[in-house]
Amino acid sequence: MANWLRLNNMHIALFILYSIACGYGLVKLPWVRKTGIRPPVLLALFVLHVAVGCLHNVIAWRYYPGHGDIWDDYQWSLVLRKWLLTDPNRFLLFNSKWTYVTHNGIIFIQLLFNFFSADNIYINTVLFNFFLFLGNAGLYQVFRRHFPADPLTALTAFLLPSTLFWTSCIHREGVIYLLLGLFFYEFDRVRQARSRIFALMLFLLLLYFRFTIALLLLPALLAGLLTEQHFALKYRLIPAAALAAAILIIPLAFPALTHLVITGLTGWQAEFQVLEGHSRLYLPSLDGTWTSLLRVFPYALRNGLFEPLPGSGGRPIYLAFSIELILIWMTALAALVILRQVRTGIPRPTDSVPHRDGFPPLFLTFSILGMIFVGTFVPFAGAIVRYRSLFLPFLLAPALHSLHHLPFIQRINNKLQFFI
């Protein structure tokens, strides 16, 4: 029988026990109960996340080259656990450089879970989704606050298919999505001293797990602060000026830093370019100059924003991701039409997103920049789907809420209000 099906009675018992304990904990935690979602619905969402995570493990074992990052990190976690217990010097040597420590972050998570799961990846997936759910709950609350009377939009924090698929397993994407949900929750309460401290700590964790995500947050936060008019002027201009300095002045003051940045980006793209895969897309190579980045930009737009197109990618599963992406862009296009109607004086219900709210511009800036960034460096449709999954909820949520006054969406929201 395949390795991924080898479950003994103890593992089955632990899987059931931890699933029940985590589900019970979630419906009792005040943090999760603040979502206002009824306990049966919370449990159904948690079961869905665990089921998708376990399914992803099976798919990775069956179809991914070398069984993918999930199983590779899991196998290394078993090795590191053995070294930790029997050969501490070798364990320390394996983590002796900062680059090793940052690369091993997900392995450390698997290693920690192994002590509780008797080294079973499916039980680890249950435990991981318990913590992931906290980030989902935080982002859901932010969506409910800034997209009012619209549970359909808020539920995208839990149910967007590609995001659910790539974050419910023990992937770096899942950890980053958890941190983003918590970060935006604390940033929404930035006027409180405690929230400022927590937001900074979460930002540093994002730097650790993927520094590019943290860097992309800077212009997005700037866009949000400049458009947010609910804060006093000093609360907006001071941090906005600091972010502008970080984005513009520092590179001008330290020209060597810009060379270091483009060299690092070129090296990162080169790591992807040498890989082999069935879903390769055309992407010109960077050569260490900013001119080459401009040359890549049109292809980055196409790949990051629109690939895989229907029929590309080489595998039938990519068609599902193509359909999802088409629906998201159709929603965004409809939102642009609505915005144009508002600007030309066509009446619209007054309960829509306040234009003074800085979070929709923040989300849109973060998502668009992130998707273009992915398209700049990743030449494979499958990998683009994975890396882009973190940004899609922040593109879809503002667009979908712009349509919440339409009759058929109102009917859906009325039913959801009663159901959840």
Image (cartoon, rainbow, N blue to C red):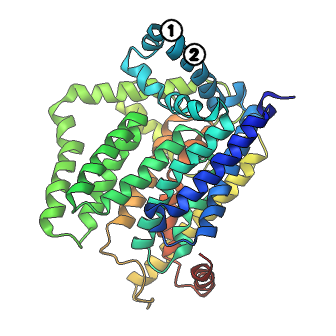
Tell me the SS state at disc 1. Answer: loop
Whether tag 1 and tag 2 are in contact, CB under 8 A, the answer is yes
Up-down relation of residue 100 to residue 238 (above or below): above
User: Which is more N-terminal, label 2 or label 1?
Assistant: 2
Camera-side residue: 208 or 219? 208
Residue 258 appears anywhere in the view: yes
Q: Considering the image in quadrants, where does the C terminus appear?
A: bottom right
Name the kind of residue labelled 1 in the image: Asp
| Residue 112 image offset from top left, x and y in percent | 52, 31
| Corner quadrant of residue 43 | bottom right
Q: Residues within 10 Å of mark 1 (few under 14, many from 20)?
A: few
Point out the image quarter for the N terminus.
top right
The image shows residue 215 at horizontal and vertical percentages of 34, 42
Q: Identity of the amino acid at label 2?
A: Lys
Name the side, left or right, on which 137 lies relative to 358: right
Q: Which residue is mark 1?
A: 87
Q: Residues within 10 Å of mark 2 (few under 14, many from 20)?
A: some
Q: Position of residue 119 (x, y in %)?
A: 64, 29
- Calculate the distance from the C-alpha at mark 1 to the C-alpha at mark 2: 7 Å
Residue 267 found in image quarter: top left
Q: Secondary structure at mark 2?
A: helix
Count of numbered tags: 2
Q: Is residue 333 visible?
A: no
